[in-house]
């Protein structure tokens, strides 16, 4: 046990913690941060366009079988199966559902086995595939006694039931994959909770499985996917078709991975395998497995837990690609990566050297292997030796196969690193769609589902991706269970516990200008001169504008007249003013001009703070008056958003009660530069702004005192921030991943008193703790306790005491008079300046409140400022809009 006696020890520990964290994954400010892919736009649930939803009588929609040709989507859920119309899954079809509940008797047995009534003692449909032209085959957990059944497609009803043991797992949560091809059923799972994991061919006879002795071929394997590749087609060596399985299993390999207990794998078997004659009877003779690597070698960041795969078949089977989603071994760190593998690299690994188990560790096998390549499919080379099937293989080959299932060569991702890296997201599913864009190139569109009901949509550009958008597909946070893409309907069907949703592959009409259409870089969208359209439905493609490669070319130049709004704002000397400029794109950077000149360096002393919401003028001086313009800069294109004429009004008489000592002055400084908020009431006798002009601050002494206190406050804040961010990064089981991406860092204060139900939203207007401005972090928290910000009280009544200061080195709370003057009771927002460098806007929201995109608190603030302007300065009315 470490006893901390030295006063500096905690600080040193903290520093060590920081540096090890930075090494581990560059958090919070390290280089890995830069790799995090930001979705260009964030679409909350109520912003979805053209989606159709299906909710049956039940829950746990897990299994999807799409038959694009006949236009039917078959869905397996808890105790029910559905046949939906792919054109619109909400439309109810005739004879479209089958109830398949476990019998009361079976449920009773399940309970008596001590299984969970609420979760396990149901029939969860886990397998659904086409059996032959007229029938489907399905399996369910059936309250811990798996059963399978044939379904007559025509009538959509069961015709025959079968034992489901060893085809379907007992446990609804157990990793499971499988499919039927050519009336052969392949599956992989740990079927029974007592048995070992197994890869099987369930029918036709003879059933095959994996070997368990003397070498276990699978170690606590957790399966996530499988695929058949028709490698026999046009094979020069007379090769067989192969079935690939993807899973994570326990790691018994030697360094350099010994620190990791789990490892991602791909295994394969040959479709023509029928097992051995004496050795490996009813076992695979062609089972081989290899490691899938997904890492950033330069940061020693290894992703080793597989969550899903998608095999994208190429025109030639050798050109097929594997997209795999990975997570980290630490369950409490939400981070995902997508790695892309070439099937050639996979084949090369299976053709390479073997590993051998020595002293319960796997090491490369350097001895000789038998003449015929062990684990290979039956090829022309075998046939030349009159070996026509796996039963003819010599014993020495099969003995070798039995003890050498693992390959020594590991499979590296294309490009040697992940294609996509995403913090604060746990991907559960992936689907990939190939699209030919207007430039004639083919692009892979990558759809990933998260564990909280969102879908990310990205386009692959060489060795990186551009994330087009993130969509909240389900209102309640829940993991995405499954995703399938229909080429015919241009839709993706996504299932989760609460239902199935049909999402158009693109919603081009969301982009209302040429530039937003081009910036989106959606290969399915193009600008036709008037609107952003789906290019596949457009007759004359040559008239369309699209720029997937750069995302900037093809639109006409934008002139100053492009400003959407022109406004006038007035402010009294010494007061603060927020000029709103909200950017729709998370990738756009706000740039401001003052009187036509670009504003540079928003340092502490200029009196400006810039944020994603707008520009804040702090303690306005006459020099701050002028014409401000806000631009959203994306891909080096400046898009005018809005412009403001700012007038600074002369000073009111100073208050007689001015403090004189430096600390009080500093205090005063913080207090006075807090945004003063005017009441909406008409009767206002007392002067609202008894604030000083600032002749006092012109003395060096006072300036010094002020700066010192500010530096101290900033330093303290930095420290707290680091700790909080570290805490969040390591301990957060669900950090805020979506909602709003700010271009500035976030100031977070931990509070514990907040109830979980109260939603706190936070936006920040710049802070420059470490001088970086490209740090990216989510700026809104919905239900994370640890991120609940500051004790800003949403329902401040005029006479109430100000809320207690959060545990931060902070300026004193606002004097009560400010509240009395500044807040109407109805106002849901509280603005709080926590130090000289950052502002926070807080609110308590109802639980059904919409996203920050649709409800900006700065709008609220702006309204307040507007009111203040009217009531206080009696200005000419706002000349808004062009
Ligand atoms: C089924 O759905 C419920 C929520 O409706 C969820 O809590 C549960 O984990 C789901 N079960 C499975 C097996 O997915
Ligand atoms: C799908 O069907 C539902 C119910 O019949 C209907 O409300 C919805 O408008 C349809 N959607 C489309 C895109 O036609
Ligand atoms: C099925 O469709 C037929 C006609 O197509 C109709 O007569 C029948 O009522 C429908 N049944 C149900 C259950 O909707
Ligand atoms: C619906 O199912 C019933 C029997 O279950 C069958 O008689 C009827 O023909 C089916 N209707 C359609 C439209 O498939
Ligand atoms: C499909 O399989 C079912 C169930 O085994 C069988 O009854 C049916 O005759 C088969 N249909 C065809 C066309 O082979
Ligand atoms: C196989 O080769 C033939 C002739 O070379 C070609 O026409 C055909 O497209 C190939 N098939 C596949 C699936 O590659
Ligand atoms: C393999 O097939 C060839 C030709 O089809 C046949 O002549 C030979 O006897 C077969 N060998 C065995 C061991 O079955
Ligand atoms: C395409 O552009 C040409 C000229 O650039 C124009 O004449 C034609 O009408 C356009 N077609 C459509 C469908 O807009
Ligand atoms: C756009 O601006 C560039 C340089 O500013 C100019 O060369 C080009 O002609 C302009 N294009 C249009 C369509 O106005």
Image: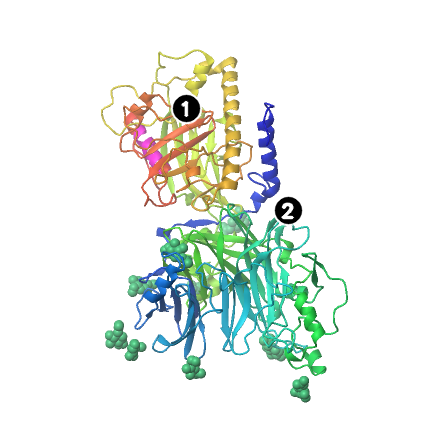
**What colouring does the structure picture have?**
rainbow
Q: Nearer the viewer, residue 398 or 485?
A: 398
Q: Secondary structure at mark 2?
A: loop
Q: Is residue 460 above or below residue 785?
A: below
Could you tell me which residue is drawn at 22 percent across and 24 percent down?
683
Q: Nearer the viewer, residue 12 or 143?
A: 143
- Residue 259 is labelled as none
Q: Is residue 795 above or below residue 430?
A: above
Residue 838: give x, y in percent of width and height. Answer: 46, 30
Q: In which quadrant will I find the C terminus?
A: top left
Q: Residues within 10 Å of mark 1 (few under 14, many from 20)?
A: some
Q: Secondary structure at mark 1?
A: loop
Distance from the alpha carbon under mark 1 to that under mark 2: 46 Å
Classify the position of ligand 3 by quadrant: top left, top right, bottom left or bottom right: bottom left
Q: In which quadrant will I find the N terminus?
A: top right
Q: Magenta segment, which residues?
A: 858-869
Q: Is residue 494 above or below residue 158?
A: above
Magenta-colored stretch includes residue 860 = yes
Please indicate whether residue 24 sits to the left or right of residue 524 in the image.
Answer: right
Report which residue position mark 1 lands on.
673
Q: Residues within 10 Å of mark 2 (few under 14, many from 20)?
A: few
Could you tell me which residue is drawn at 40 percent across and 58 percent down?
115
Magenta stretch: helix, strand or loop mostly = helix
Q: Is residue 631 above or below residue 459?
A: above
Residue 480: give x, y in percent of width and height. Answer: 43, 56
Residue 780: give x, y in percent of width and height. Answer: 42, 41
Image quadrant assignment for residue 517 = bottom left
Report which residue position mark 2 lands on.
300
């Amino acid at each position: 046990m470490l006893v901390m006696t030295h006063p500096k020890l905690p600080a040193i520990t903290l520093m060590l913690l920081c540096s090890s964290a930075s090494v581990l994954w560059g958090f919070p400010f390290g280089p890995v941060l830069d790799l995090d892919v930001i979705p260009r736009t964030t679409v909350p649930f109520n912003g979805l366009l053209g989606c159709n939803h299906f909710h049956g009588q039940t829950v746990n929609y897990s299994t999807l079988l799409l038959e694009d040709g006949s236009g039917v989507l078959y869905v397996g859920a808890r105790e029910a199966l559905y046949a939906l119309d792919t054109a619109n899954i909400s439309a109810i079809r005739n004879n479209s559902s089958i109830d398949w509940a476990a019998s009361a008797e079976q449920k009773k047995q399940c309970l008596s086995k001590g299984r969970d009534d609420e979760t396990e003692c149901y029939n969860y449909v886990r397998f659904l595939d086409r059996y032959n032209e007229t029938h489907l085959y399905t399996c369910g957990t059936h309250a811990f006694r798996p059963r399978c059944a044939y379904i007559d497609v025509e009538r959509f009803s069961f015709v025959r039931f079968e034992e489901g043991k060893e085809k379907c797992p007992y446990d609804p949560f157990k990793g499971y994959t499988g499919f039927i091809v050519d009336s052969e059923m392949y599956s992989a799972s740990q079927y029974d909770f007592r048995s070992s994991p197994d890869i099987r061919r369930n029918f036709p006879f003879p059933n095959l499985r994996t070997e368990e002795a003397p070498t276990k071929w699978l170690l606590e394997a957790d399966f996530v996917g499988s695929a058949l590749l028709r490698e026999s087609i046009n094979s020069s060596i007379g090769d067989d078709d192969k079935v690939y399985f993807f899973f994570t299993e326990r790691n018994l390999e030697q360094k350099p991975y010994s620190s990791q207990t789990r490892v991602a794998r791909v295994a394969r078997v040959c479709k023509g395998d029928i097992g051995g004659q004496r050795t490996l009877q009813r076992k695979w003779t062609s089972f081989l497995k290899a490691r899938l690597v997904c890492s950033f070698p330069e940061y020693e960041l290894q992703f080793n837990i597989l969550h899903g795969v998608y095999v994208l078949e190429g025109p030639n089977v050798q050109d097929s690609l594997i997209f795999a989603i990975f997570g980290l071994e630490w369950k409490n760190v939400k981070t995902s990566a997508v790695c892309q593998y070439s099937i050639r690299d996979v084949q090369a690994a299976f053709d390479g050297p073997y590993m051998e188990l020595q002293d319960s560790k796997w090491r490369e096998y350097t001895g000789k292997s038998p003449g015929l390549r062990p684990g290979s499919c039956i090829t022309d080379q075998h046939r030349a030796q009159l070996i026509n099937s796996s039963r003819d293989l010599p014993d020495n080959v099969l003995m070798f196969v039995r003890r050498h299932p693992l390959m020594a060569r590991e499979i590296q991702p294309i490009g040697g690193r992940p294609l996509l890296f995403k913090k604060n997201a746990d991907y559960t599913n992936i689907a990939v769609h190939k699209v030919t864009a207007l430039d004639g190139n083919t692009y892979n569109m990558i759809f990933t589902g998260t564990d909280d009901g969102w879908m990310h949509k990205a386009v692959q550009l060489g060795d990186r991706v551009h994330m087009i958008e993130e969509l909240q597909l389900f209102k309640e946070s829940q993991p995405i269970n499954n995703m399938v893409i229909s080429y015919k309907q241009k839709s993706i069907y996504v299932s989760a516990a609460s239902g199935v949703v049909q999402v158009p592959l693109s919603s081009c009409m969301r982009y209302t200008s040429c530039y937003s259409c081009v910036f989106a870089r959606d290969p399915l969208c193009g600008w036709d001169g008037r609107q952003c359209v789906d290019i596949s439905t457009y007759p004359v493609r040559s008239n369309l504008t699209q720029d997937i490669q750069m995302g900037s070319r093809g639109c006409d130049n934008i002139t100053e007249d492009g400003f959407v709004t022109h406004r006038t704002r007035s402010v009294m000397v010494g007061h603060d003013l927020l000029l709103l400029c909200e950017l729709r794109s998370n990738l756009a950077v706000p740039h401001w001009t003052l009187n036509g000149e670009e504003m540079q360096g928003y340092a502490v002393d200029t009196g400006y703070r810039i944020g994603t919401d707008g520009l804040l003028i702090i303690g306005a001086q006459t020099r701050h008056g002028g014409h401000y313009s806000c631009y959203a800069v994306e891909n080096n294109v400046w898009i005018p958003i809005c412009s403001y004429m700012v007038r600074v009004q002369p000073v009111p008489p100073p208050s007689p009660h001015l403090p004189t000592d430096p600390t009080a002055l500093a205090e005063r400084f913080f207090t006075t530069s807090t945004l003063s908020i005017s009441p909406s009431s008409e009767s206002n006798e007392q002067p609202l702004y008894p604030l000083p002009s600032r002749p006092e601050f012109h003395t060096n002494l006072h300036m010094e005192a002020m700066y010192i206190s500010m530096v101290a406050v900033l330093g303290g804040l930095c420290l707290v921030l680091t700790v909080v961010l570290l805490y969040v990064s390591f301990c957060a089981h669900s950090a805020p991943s979506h909602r709003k991406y700010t271009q500035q860092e976030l100031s977070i204060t931990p509070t514990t008193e907040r109830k979980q139900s109260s939603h706190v939203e936070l936006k920040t207007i710049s802070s420059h703790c470490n001088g970086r401005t490209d740090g990216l972090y989510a700026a809104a928290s919905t239900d994370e306790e640890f991120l609940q910000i500051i004790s800003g009280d949403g329902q401040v009544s005029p006479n109430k005491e100000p809320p207690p200061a959060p545990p931060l080195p902070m300026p004193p709370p606002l004097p009560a008079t400010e509240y009395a003057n500044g807040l109407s009771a109805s106002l849901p927002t509280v603005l709080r300046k926590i130090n000289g460098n950052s502002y926070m806007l807080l609110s308590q929201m109802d639980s059904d409140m919409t996203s920050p995109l649709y409800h900006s608190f700065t709008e609220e603030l702006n309204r307040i400022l507007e009111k203040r302007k009217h009531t206080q300065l009696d200005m000419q009315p706002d000349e808004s809009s062009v």
